[in-house]
Image: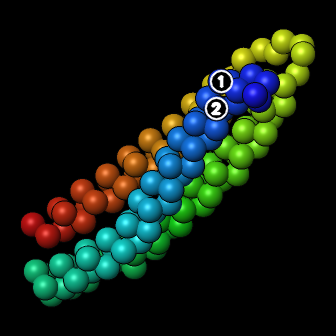
Amino acid sequence: MIRNFREHAANERTFLAWVRTAIAVMAFGFLIERFDLFLRITALSSSGQGITGAGQKFANFAGLTFIVLGTMMIVLAAIRLFVTGKKIDSDISHAGAGTELDIALAVLLALLGGSLGLYLSHAVLVWF
């Protein structure tokens, strides 16, 4: 039997949850990148003019940012998995992991989501 099996299994489940979230963030970034194509086609068909170059650059930047953020989340989750695994096997007690990183990632995602909301609301208002 593996020593502290329950704790190690919980650590692995947490890691896998972070990886699933990171994959979803990266897929969302790819979707943003491709949704820009949809906006260009729709803008051309409805008004005869495409979206601005700045809007296209913003969508490309936002999509790439989400993809990079997802990649960083996987790397940080892997580091956290190994560090927590060593702490579980250690005989001395350790303080719990802080939530600063989790809160920072949540705030960054909220800021990116808000900026995308503004971008999409501007793109929708241009159609009317």
Provide the secondary structure element on which disc 2 rests.
helix
Q: Nearer the viewer, residue 9 or 39?
A: 9
Q: Which residue is mark 1?
A: 6
Place of residue 76 in the rendered image (x, y in percent of width and height, measured from the top left): 70, 45
Q: Are marks 2 and 1 in contact (CB under 8 Å)?
A: yes
Is 81 on the left-hand or right-hand side of 22? right
Name the residue located 58 percent from the left edge and 54 percent from the top edge: 69
Name the residue located 18 percent from the left edge and 68 percent from the top edge: 126
Quarter holding the N terminus? top right
Provide the secondary structure element on which disc 1 rests.
helix
Q: Is residue 54 at all visible to an observer of this figure?
A: no
Place of residue 46 in the rendered image (x, y in percent of width and height, measured from the top left): 10, 80
Is 26 on the left-hand or right-hand side of 73? left
Name the residue located 79 percent from the left edge and 39 percent from the top edge: 82
Quarter holding the C terminus? bottom left
Q: Which residue type carries mark 1? A: Arg
Name the residue at the top extreme: 93
Name the residue at the right extreme: 91
- 1 w.r.t. 56: above or below: above
What numbered label is drawn on residue 14? none
What numbered label is drawn on residue 9? 2
Q: Nearer the viewer, residue 15 or 73?
A: 15
Q: Is residue 16 at all visible to an observer of this figure?
A: yes
Place of residue 77 in the rendered image (x, y in percent of width and height, measured from the top left): 67, 43
Place of residue 97 in the rendered image (x, y in percent of width and height, measured from the top left): 71, 23
Q: Which of the 4 image quadrants contains residue 96?
A: top right
